[in-house]
């Protein structure tokens, strides 16, 4: 009878032909001693690399291993980052909405109180083509309120001006909302222009004016 | 490998089987340089060796539960994974390194392995055991192991009868076991 132990070295090296391999594998299942002999030879064989001088791998290799063994951790990190961004975005959005609503409520409250004042007078503010784009209210005490149809476009501000006849306009302040309170007492006209943020020394894009004297 | 004072490889592998990534890091730190050396020897390109090194440790992590200490040391388990993957790569690329012409298979004075007296114990012992083999036998064994050559390929490569190639490879492995003596058994217990 053939001694199958002779096949073990070739089997350990993966060099056995199919027929012999099947024959040996069948016997290995039934023979613990043969299996131990094979394991012993395999352990001998896999000592060969111990004769090689170790070479330290580049530092980034283990990080790549970790990325592949911890995809769940990676996803958790991505999800956490996305959640934080989402919260920040929603928070920013909510805060922005809240701020806008608060400004709107303040504007409405101011307009309501001015309209409720029986001493208040008003006039439409018109552009060069006679098109009304806002309303000016004023009180005898010198205060006036500009109410414009729309907030200033993005990247621009409104700038209010007071002017006496024959003199250069004087800035009364800038605003980006729809309502702006100022004073008119020493001026003949109060007007509004569209300017870059921070305003301009003189109107660069006049929108319209109303006589207040 | 003796690991006195440190957690044995088998314990690390048990922890890794339970998903402990710190154990993976420890095993990588302990064995990656030797596995990388094996892969460089087999593939002879750093890029591919790095790639297969990654694959090897990823597989080790995923299949840690399959490890049976009764069948051998962790090092052998790791080398088995690495070698198997590298051989697959060699078969795919079908670009095995050509025979180095300035190495004579029958020159008994030619030292193929590199080991120094200050090397760790295991490397010295394995190096010495290899040095005691017939140089031609050793070359055949190493080509079969590192490059995955079949008996037929070895016979063609070294221009010898097929039967001679088979006999020499078997003889080399059996002799190596004899020269390493009881080391194989003790390695699996200490790993």
Image (cartoon, coloured by chain):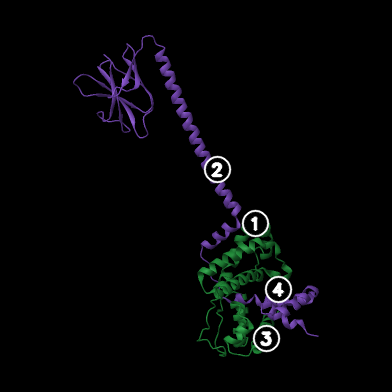
Q: Chain of mark 4?
A: B
Count of numbered badges drawn on the protein: 4
Q: Which residue is mark 1?
A: B20
Q: Residue at x 45, y 28 (%)?
A: A100
Would you name the residue on which mark 3 appears? B171
Question: Do badges 3 and 2 share one subunit?
Answer: no
Mark closer to the observer (4, 1): 1
Question: Which residue lies at the image location 65% right of the left edge and 87% below the top edge?
Answer: B168
Disc 2 and disc 1 in contact, CB within 8 angstroms: no
Task: Give the residue number, with chain letter if any, for mark 2.
Answer: A83
Residue at coordinates 43% horizontally, 20% vertically from top-left? A108
**For the residues marked 4 and 1, what is the alpha-carbon distance in whole angstroms?**
27 Å
Is A194 left or right of A82, judged from the image as shown?
left
Looking at the image, do the residues carrying marks 1 and 3 touch, with CB atoms under 8 Å apart? no
- Which chain contains the residue that carries disc 1? B
Kindly report the distance in space between the C-alpha atoms of the residues bearing marks 3 and 2.
Answer: 64 Å
Residue A35 % position (x, y)? 76, 75
Q: Earlier in the sequence, mark 1 or mark 3?
A: 1
């Amino acid at each position: 009878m053939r001694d199958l132990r002779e096949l073990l070295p070739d089997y350990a090296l993966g060099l056995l032909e199919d027929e012999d391999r099947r024959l040996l594998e069948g016997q290995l299942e039934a023979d613990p001693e043969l299996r131990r002999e094979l394991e012993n030879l395999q352990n001998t064989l896999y000592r060969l690399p111990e004769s090689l001088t170790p070479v330290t791998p580049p530092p980034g290799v283990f990080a790549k291993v970790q990325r592949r063994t911890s995809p769940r951790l990676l996803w958790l990190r991505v999800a956490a980052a996305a959640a934080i961004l989402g919260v920040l975005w929603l928070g920013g959005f909510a805060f922005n909405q809240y701020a806008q609503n608060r400004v709107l409520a303040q504007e409405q409250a101011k307009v309501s109180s001015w309209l409720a004042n029986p001493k208040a007078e008003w006039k439409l503010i018109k552009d060069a083509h006679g098109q009304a784009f806002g309303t000016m209210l004023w009180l005898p005490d010198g205060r006036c309120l500009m109410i414009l149809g729309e907030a200033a476009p993005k990247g621009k501000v409104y700038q209010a001006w007071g002017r006496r006849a024959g003199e250069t306009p004087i800035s009364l302040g800038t605003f980006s909302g729809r309502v702006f309170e100022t004073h008119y007492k020493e001026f003949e006209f109060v007007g509004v222009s569209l300017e870059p943020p921070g305003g301009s020394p003189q109107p660069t894009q006049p929108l319209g004016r109303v006589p207040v004297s | 490998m003796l690991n006195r004072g440190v957690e044995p490889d088998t314990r690390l592998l048990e922890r890794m089987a339970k998903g402990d990534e710190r154990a993976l890091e420890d095993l990588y730190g302990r064995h990656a340089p030797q596995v990388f050396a094996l892969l460089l020897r087999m593939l002879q390109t750093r890029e591919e060796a790095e790639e297969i090194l990654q694959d090897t440790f990823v597989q080790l992590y995923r299949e840690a539960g399959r490890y049976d200490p009764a069948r051998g040391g962790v090092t052998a388990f790791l080398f088995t994974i690495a070698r198997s993957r590298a051989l697959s790569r060699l078969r795919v690329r079908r670009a095995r390194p050509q025979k180095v012409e300035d190495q004579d298979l029958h020159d008994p004075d030619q030292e193929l392995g590199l080991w120094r007296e200050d090397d760790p114990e295991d490397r010295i012992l394995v190096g010495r055991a290899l040095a005691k083999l017939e140089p031609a036998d050793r070359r055949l064994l190493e080509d079969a192991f590192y490059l995955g050559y079949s008996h037929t390929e070895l016979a063609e490569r070294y221009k010898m009868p097929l039967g001679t190639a088979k006999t020499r490879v078997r003889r080399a492995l059996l002799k190596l076991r004899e020269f390493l003596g009881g080391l194989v058994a003790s390695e699996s217990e200490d790993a």
